[in-house]
Image (tube, rainbow, N blue to C red):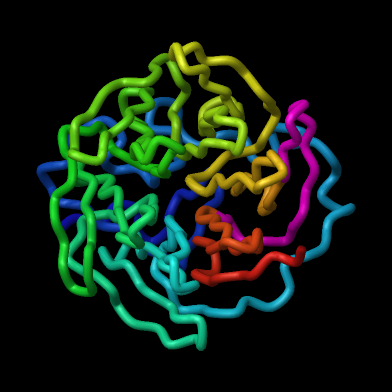
Amino acid sequence: MRSLLLPKLLVGGLLVSSVAACTSDDDAGRSGASQSPGSSASSGPPTQGGGTGGEPAAKAPGAGKPKYTGFSSPTGLAYGRDGSVYVSNWSAGTVERITRDGKRSVHVKGLQAPAGLAVDRQGVLYIADYNADVVYRAPAAGKLEKFASGFHTPTGISFDSRHNLLVTNRASNELMSVSPDGRSSRVADELRTPVGVVEAADGTIYVSNYEGGVLSRVTRDGTVETHSKDFDGLGVGIVADKAGSVFVTDRTAGAIKRVARDGSITSVLTGLSSPVALGIDAEGHLATATWGDSAYYEIPS
């Protein structure tokens, strides 16, 4: 194993000294393999504070105290049907499960670099392994099955209304769709370092792009349009609520932001230390996990 970024880790333009990520030596030559999911492999770190990101951060509440700590570069977050929450530990190669009463356990281990997480309608967990170019399913604790492979640094994943799994191919700038039986097809290309994806209630697909700080809208025919821009450094975390708003992690800004249907941006939580993961439960409550302090925060409604 080769340490990637020691003693400091690059996360969306922030240098964090307390976290180290690893990958295999044979991944060193792949595009994006030695980078964090949202860092820029082609041009280095972006300028911090490079975008306006909508409403000034001072108008949003601060992060406050985390509910859980002690993660290892938490990158993906998803809720199970029973209300439990799953968090992927990028550096440790594990996914943790936290029950509703706060009990924590390692759900699966042995992954190379687990990134985005998603849960299907049966409650089965899916995991994008960024360095392995594979999406796994975990039907039970301690059990991993290969669901689909042949990706190019798969990062963010989520299910659409047709029960297909949407996958962002970060290295090849593509959005892929995987059918329930594991067949992959390309939905769109010419994205800009895509790291997160979600389908909104009206069927619109949104993709967070690290490069350029752009949130894209993808039509059914694969056309890519700019929905909103001027983010400082979008992360893997992106979710949508039942009202049609989209929420994103703007890591370089240390904020969670709401994007309205008209593309306007409002900060809903600030003062975070490089937020990467974002999840929403069945009741519309939001939570995020941060790389900078390896913590999990619940977001005030």
Residue 264 on the magenta segment? yes
Which residue ends up furthest to the right in the rendered image? 59
Residue shown at the point (49%, 11%) measured from the top left:
223
Q: Is residue 252 visible?
A: no
In the image, 281 versus 189, the foreground residue is 281
Residue 279 on the magenta segment? no
Q: Is residue 201 above or below residue 294?
A: above
Which residue ends up furthest to the left in the rendered image? 26
Residue shown at the point (54%, 79%) measured from the top left:
68
In the image, 198 versus 57, the foreground residue is 198
Q: Is residue 222 visible?
A: yes
In the image, 264 versus 101, the foreground residue is 101
Looking at the figure, which quarter contains the N terminus? bottom left
Q: Which residues are magenta?
A: 258-275
Residue shown at the point (73%, 61%) measured from the top left:
271
Q: Is residue 132 above or below residue 54?
A: below
- The x and y percentages for residue 83 are 49, 72
- The x and y percentages for residue 64 are 73, 73
Residue shown at the point (73%, 30%) measured from the top left:
261
Q: Is residue 298 left or right of residue 106?
A: right
In the image, 159 versus 293, the foreground residue is 159
Q: Is residue 56 left or right of residue 245?
A: right
User: Which quadrant of the figure has residue 63?
Assistant: bottom right
- The x and y percentages for residue 65 are 69, 78
Looking at the figure, which quarter contains the C terminus? bottom right
Q: Is residue 211 left or right of residue 300?
A: left
- The x and y percentages for residue 86 are 41, 67
Q: Is residue 190 left or right of residue 292?
A: left
Q: Is residue 15 above or below residue 141?
A: above
